[in-house]
Image (tube, coloured by chain):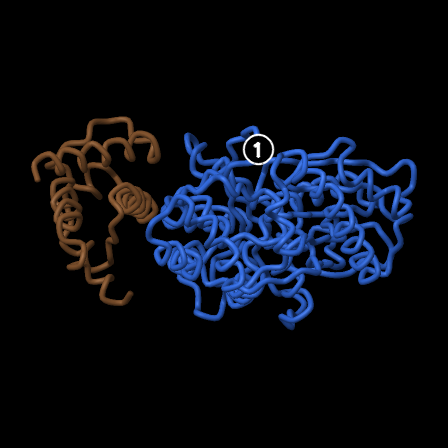
Chain colours: A blue, B brown
Amino acid sequence: MHSAPPGHDRSLPYIRAVGRALPAHYATQEQLIAALREVWATRHFNLDRLEELHRNVQVKGRYLALPVDAYPGLATFQQRNDAWIRESTLLGEQVVRQALERAELTARDVDHVFFVTVTGIATPSVEARLANLLRFREDFKRTPIFGLGCVAGAAGLARAADYLRAFPSHTALLVSVELCSLTLQREDLSIPNIIASGLFGDGAACAVLSGAEVPGAKGPRVVASRSVFYPDTERIMGWDVVDSGFKVILSAKVPQLVKDHVRRNVEDFLVEQGLRRSDIRHWVAHTGGPRVLQAFEEALELESSALSRSWASLQEVGNLSSSSVLFVLGETLEQAGARPGDWGLMLAMGPGFCAEMVLLRW
Amino acid sequence: MVELEKEVLAEIRRIAVEELEWKGAVEPQQDLLRDLQLDSLGLTVLAVGLENRFRIRLSEEDAQEVKTVADLVRLVANRVAAPSRAPVEARS
């Protein structure tokens, strides 16, 4: 029995469109520094150093779920999470409508919704609330995924593609909503939290995928994916769940982990697919932060322009956790001028610590 | 000065255990990077903790001359004794 060469397998799912949405409230990095300075002064002596930490992440500003002056009023986990449910449902509805319109589909065409987030919790989960607003069919399937963090944009896309190989006549949505600003612990004045409050922003993305047998489906195809788990790295990134909500765990070891592992991980995956790094024309990298992007560039020996969309996204909107890599994917779909036969690689990392790679072919 | 240096060393030990999740001993002769395995974030956490506790400012230039725990103890103690000599103070 002969199998088709990579990228020519007829069962490969399509990525038809990626919607992106940002909340209405925007604040520049300097406005956010000014808003936080007073809180920092309650415990810290050298505020100039903290301002530098906020400027070093190279983010120009962030979109926020609420106006800046509404955040001090959110004192408890319940208040933050209630705001998260309300705002993530609104932003989720907006991004799904946009993505379906771009894919020329309706909510009735959707068979399965994968909903990923790490910034709030809800039961019923947000995709159920979206079903009431958008009127998905009563037999639509739901897979809410909490806890993968930044990797969930790539991992969620990979899981949706796995599903569509089994159900090639179906259409699936990957919906990512991350309202990082609503996890901010104002009373946590630790350095990791101060860095996180300078780096992470709010946003939502929705990828529309169809199985190979769906009539009219077009777009790049998901050829393969690979998950990589790094043992004994639980304290590299994550949440400590405390009475007031999610307290960030963030280690400076992330860029070093990328440098140590990503090249071998990518090469092993590509070799399995009969490819080399030089075959990849479109790199779709999660916008972890400036040092993570630099680590990707160095470890993978990429040209200076290879991650330009990731750098631009980081500067314009900050790290949107799982939504970030989908923002970069959407911009690649619409602006990269990809030609039939081009290869692309999505790459993200997140709590575990772990990585997810998704191979695309136009 | 000796008392002050003891106080600084005690604060470095507290930060290492409580904020940096350091499990081992902290001794003056240890190298901050090699022995205490501090990365850029760890060094920042340590510097901020000392700045807050002793109401001083530490700068990038200061970091050039600090390799060991003892170097850091001396720097902080000197800065507490003569805060106006801190390079960063000239800006404010």
Q: Secondary structure at mark 1?
A: loop
Percent x, y for residue A281? 55, 65
Residue ID for mark 1: A244
Query: Which residue of the protein is positioned furthest toward the left in this rendering?
Result: B2
- Residue at 58% in and 60% down: A62
The amino acid type of the residue labelled 1 equals: Ser
Residue nearest the viewer, comparing A98 with A271? A98
Q: Residue B30: x and y, percent?
A: 14, 37
Q: In the rendered view, does A136 fall on the left or right side of A264?
A: right
Whether residue A281 is visible to the viewer of this picture, yes or no, is no
> Residue A184 or A270: which is nearer the viewer?
A184
User: In the image, is residue B23 above or below residue B29?
Assistant: above
Crowding at dot 1, Cα within 10 Å, few <14 / some 14-19 / many 20+, comes out as: some
Nearer to us in this view, A133 or A18: A133
Q: Position of residue A323 (x, y in %)?
A: 63, 52
Q: Quadrant of residue A83?
A: top right
Q: Where residue A197 sits: x, y (%)?
A: 50, 50
On screen, residue B41 versus residue A290, left or right, reads: left
Residue A102 seen in the figure? yes
